[in-house]
Amino acid sequence: MADRFYTPDPLGPGEYVLTGPEAHHLAQVRRFAEGDAVTLFNGDGREYPAHVLSASKRAVTLTVLAPVEADRELAFPLVVGSALPKGDRADFLIEKLTELGVTRFVPLLTTRAVVQPKSSVVEKFTRVVIEASKQCGRNRLMQIDPPRKWSDFVSRTDLPGARVVLHTGPGLAQVSAKGGTVAVGPEGGFTAEEVAEAVACGWAVASLGTRVLRVETAALAAAALLGLA
């Protein structure tokens, strides 16, 4: 797989000028030069093979070839809503959910959450998604939603498939579905009231086992199970 670079611009065969941080990375960090082959993508699901015509500090001119269909997405939507872990663990979570093929991520505002995310996480996490997509070969970006209050999230009617709240306790079924929507609480867990609110909105309650997992561990384990079911 050729080195991949992202642009939000529409792409098609012909000459294209790449600017901004990606142009700097291509020309100054990776030091691609005239004639070198790269791949561009813009999130439309396709790849665009290209050759470098010229490169400067601020812009790279490329010849873009015919697009190539390269579908590396799951065959079904998979949404993860989760409280956020502290610090760099949140970036790690977003990176790995991107690699696992998750369609959409919703940061959750819950009662026991230590991190109460602000709207600025959308831009921050989108940058992480782009970098992870460059590495793993995805040609559609995982969507990052603005933070949602728990009551707003569980009452939404546009969430796909089976909706499952991860919880701990005796008598809970193990997570086993294909795609759908999964909600992950903070390390203190969802409150009984939050679980009851979700159940009242039609959510099922399930477990990943008897051990208490960190937020990112639970979210990634659930995404892997639901993505491979």
Image (spheres, rainbow, N blue to C red):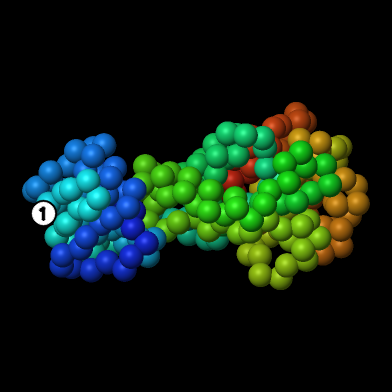
- Asked if one can make out residue 177 in the rendered structure from this viewpoint, the answer is no
Look at 39% across and 52% down and name the residue there.
138
Instruction: Using the rendered view, name the quadrant where residue 204 is placed.
Output: bottom right
- Residue type, numbered disc 1: Leu
Instruction: Using the rendered view, name the quadrant where residue 135 is placed.
Output: top left
Q: Compared with residue 208, is residue 73 higher up or lower down, i.e. above or below?
A: below
Look at 73% across and 46% down and name the residue there.
116
Q: Compared with residue 210, is residue 8 higher up or lower down, i.e. above or below?
A: below
Q: Position of residue 45 (x, y in %)?
A: 37, 62
Front-lying residue, 184 or 161:
184
Query: Relative to 97, is 58 on the left or the right?
Result: left
Question: For the image shown, how many numbered marks are present on the structure?
Answer: 1
Q: Which residue is mark 1?
A: 53
Q: Residue furthest front?
A: 57
Q: Position of residue 208 (x, y in %)?
A: 71, 38
Q: Position of residue 17 (x, y in %)?
A: 22, 60
Q: Position of residue 77 (x, y in %)?
A: 55, 60
Secondary structure of the residue carrying numbered label 1: strand
Look at 73% across and 67% down and name the residue there.
156
- Asked if one can make out residue 64 in the rendered structure from this viewpoint, the answer is yes
Q: Residue furthest left?
A: 35
